[in-house]
Amino acid sequence: MGTARRLPLRSVVLDATAVTLAAEERSPARRVLRRWQDDSVDLYISATTLTEVLRGHTRDTLIHRLLAAMSVRVVDAELGRAAGERIGRTRTRGNVTLDALVAQIASTLPRPVAVMTADVQDMSALVDPDVMVVDVAA
């Protein structure tokens, strides 16, 4: 993840694992996000990601602090259809619905754009060829 800081980006979408790791104050993922914010990179998540990361516990406070700096993209019928078609087009197997929504959101954002995830293999199969995949676990 050390090289991710140097990438020239305009937009980044985080999946659930990226949000969870970046919410931890001393995590490498948090440091990368801070540098991107310093570089005026716009940060996004899918509304479905909220379902994956928020549990109504005090631990959510860290996540809410992180979310305050992000834009939440609503999942509507158009986005849902496009994500489903993306799964079909890429012939991705397994439980990739939420990943496909993240990939579809990335496809709509200003370039250069990246997706921050721990699921590099599935996400790489789902994103457009010009979307960078940043391994949050690296």
Image (cartoon, rainbow, N blue to C red):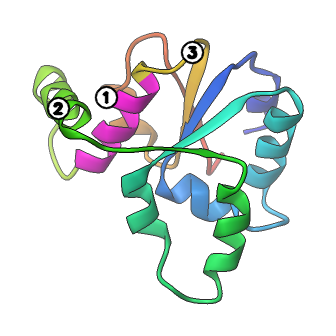
Q: Position of residue 3 (x, y in %)?
A: 77, 28
Q: Secondary structure at mark 3?
A: loop
Tell me the residue at 20%/52% (across/down): 95
The answer to whether 21 is drawn above or below residue 108 in the figure is: below
Residue at label 2?
A: 87
- Mark 2–mark 1 Cα distance, whole angstroms, equals 7 Å
In primary-sequence order, the first of circles 3 and 1 is 3
- Mark 3–mark 2 Cα distance, whole angstroms, equals 22 Å
| Residue 99 forms part of the magenta stretch | yes
Q: Quadrant of residue 7?
A: top right
| Residue 115 forms part of the magenta stretch | no
The answer to whether 103 is drawn above or below residue 6 in the figure is: below
Question: How many numbered marks does the figure carry?
Answer: 3
Residue at label 1?
A: 126
- Mark 3–mark 1 Cα distance, whole angstroms, equals 18 Å
Q: Nearer the viewer, residue 31 or 47?
A: 47
Q: Position of residue 101 (x, y in %)?
A: 32, 39
The amino acid beneath tag 1 is Leu
Q: Secondary structure at mark 2?
A: helix
- Asked if labels 1 and 2 touch by Cβ distance under 8 angstroms, the answer is yes
Picture disc at residue 110:
3
The amino acid beneath tag 2 is Ile
Crowdedness near tag 2: few (<14), some (14–19) or many (≥20) residues, C-alpha within 10 Å: many
Tell me the residue at 73%/30% (across/down): 4
Q: Nearer the viewer, residue 119 or 101?
A: 101
The amino acid beneath tag 3 is Pro
Tell me the residue at 68%/20% (across/down): 10
> For the C terminus, which image quadrant?
top right
Q: Which residues are magenta?
A: 97-106
Nearest-to-viewer mark from 3 and 2: 3
In primary-sequence order, the first of circles 3 and 2 is 2
Q: Secondary structure at mark 1?
A: helix
